[in-house]
Amino acid sequence: MTDAKTQIEETVKANDVVLYMKGTKDMPQCGFSSRVAGVLNFMGVEFADVNVLADEGVRQGIKDYSDWPTIPQLYVKGEFVGGCDIITEMTLSGELDTLFTKENIAFNQEAADKIREANG
């Protein structure tokens, strides 16, 4: 389990935005992962995707690392932000925009506004 923890720690520290998900950003394999990856892709956020289905150690390790029981899990600048419900709420409230701005993460403000308009 230590190997998975080390791998996870290195990944979240080496990338500004990381999504631990089922599948990949181009081919999500669950609805929740698809929703979060879709938001990030639509907003033009560059992010690393880690397919937890490819490695059982990482799949369990990420849950232990964050003390969060579900996947997907989003990390920004090494900090755990949340899963699908939290990211959805943050997107709709504008909190995700604020976080990205504060952390100097490039994103498309117009796209973020369109998501809110469509769901308002």
Image (cartoon, rainbow, N blue to C red):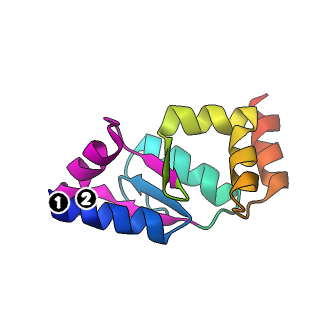
Residue drawn at the location 61% of the way across and 67% of the way down:
46
- Considering every residue shown, the one lying at the far top of the view is 120
Q: Tell me if residue 19 comes above or below residue 86 in the rendering.
A: below
117 sits to left or right of 104 = right
Say what secondary structure mark 2 lies in: helix
Q: Tell me if residue 17 comes above or below residue 14 in the rendering.
A: above
Say what secondary structure mark 1 lies in: helix
Q: Position of residue 35 (x, y in %)?
A: 54, 44
Residue drawn at the location 29% of the way across and 43% of the way down:
63
In the rendered structure, which amino acid carries the disc numbered 1?
Thr
Residue 20 colored in magenta in the image: no
Mark 2 vs mark 1, CA separation in Å:
5 Å
Q: Tell me if residue 67 comes above or below residue 108 in the rendering.
A: above
Q: What stretch is highlighted in magenta?
A: 47-75
Q: Mark 1 points at which residue?
A: 2
Which dot marks residue 5?
Answer: 2
Mark 1 nearby-residue class (10 Å; few <14, some 14–19, many ≥20): few
Q: Where is residue 17 in the image (x, y as percent from the top left)?
A: 55, 61
Nearer to the camera, 36 or 77? 77
Q: Where is residue 117 in the image (x, y as percent from the top left)?
A: 82, 36
